[in-house]
Amino acid sequence: MKNSKWLALALLAAQPAVADDMIQWWDASVTALHGSDYDLAASDKQSTITVETAGAWKYGDWFAFQDFIFFHDGQGDDSTTYGELSPRFSLSKITGNEFKYGAITDVSVALTLEEGEGPVTSFLYGVGLDITIPYFSYFNLNTYRRDAISSGNISDGWQITPAFRMDFPVGNSAIVVDGFIDWVFATDEDGYEKNFHFNPQIKYDLGAAIFGTHKKDKLFVGIEYDYWKNKYGVKDVDQSTYSVIAKYHF
């Protein structure tokens, strides 16, 4: 697949093979999803394998993922790919001075490269904030300028992307609610609508429940909800669908 290079970059970023003082923490995972009622896709039903990596290093943090999407009972292509590579560069880490104001605990230069099959390649750049909110394990808020790169891509505009996680203890295990929102709140082209994409996952830590707390944050099962108003910037295409998921962290 032509954009498997982003998967290679993601996996490379996840490897703690550099000096210990460079990598502060890292994580890599694989998620299997299956759902239906997808709009503007080659089929109503689809399955996805998602490879993710996240971590923090001396000058910031990163998140990257690669989707391998498989269509069922559709016409035309039976699969596609999509991925994002999102590094952030922390002003606190780079300067050695704490950028903190109230609930804001850090300020970063936030970058994202979106890449996949079709006219979807875009480069996003802006400002990221780390925010402390009660009951949230983390809450990040990135504000981006969107620049379309690939031919036929008219998604130039402005975007806000919160990412979050909440943990709720249940016996010797936990329920985790995490996800993101991509809200394109201003667009440059009349043919591309403002759109709102909400994608939370609700997961049970099955590994901790079965194997004990030493396997915490390893094996999860649950559901993913996907709501996308004006999907892909197409007016009045509002997707609302659920997928069952299983996720394993290495």
Image (cartoon, rainbow, N blue to C red):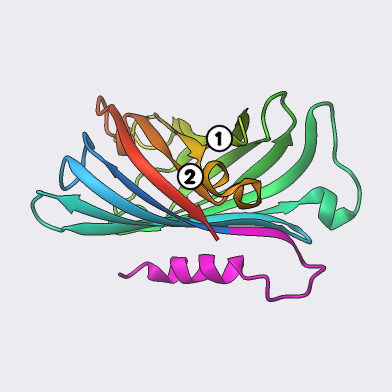
Whole-number angstrom distance, CA of label 1 to CA of label 2: 9 Å
Task: Determine whether 15 is above or below 159 in the image.
Answer: below
N-terminal of the two: label 1 or label 2? 1
Q: Amino acid at mark 1?
A: Val
Which residue occupies 38% across, 43% down? 245
Instruction: Give the magenta part as a residue range.
Output: 1-27
Task: From the viewer's side, name the closer residue of 244 and 77.
Answer: 244
Q: Are marks 1 and 2 in contact (CB under 8 Å)?
A: yes
Image quarter where the C terminus lies is bottom right
Which residue occupies 67% across, 29% down? 136
Crowding at dot 2, Cα within 10 Å, few <14 / some 14-19 / many 20+, comes out as: many
Q: Amino acid at mark 2?
A: Phe
Image quarter where the N terminus lies is bottom left
Which residue occupies 64% across, 48% down? 110
Q: Is residue 14 magenta?
A: yes
On screen, residue 84 versus residue 73, left or right, reads right
Which residue occupies 76% across, 51% down? 90
Image quadrant where residue 164 sits: top right
- The circle drawn on residue 190 is none
**Residue 97 location in percent, x, y?**
91, 48
**Residue 15 location in percent, x, y?**
62, 70
Task: From the viewer's side, name the closer residue of 44 and 123.
Answer: 44
Task: From the viewer's side, name the closer residue of 191 and 52.
Answer: 52
The residue singled out by tag 1 in the image is 176
Task: From the viewer's side, name the closer residue of 229 and 178.
Answer: 178
Q: Secondary structure at mark 1?
A: strand
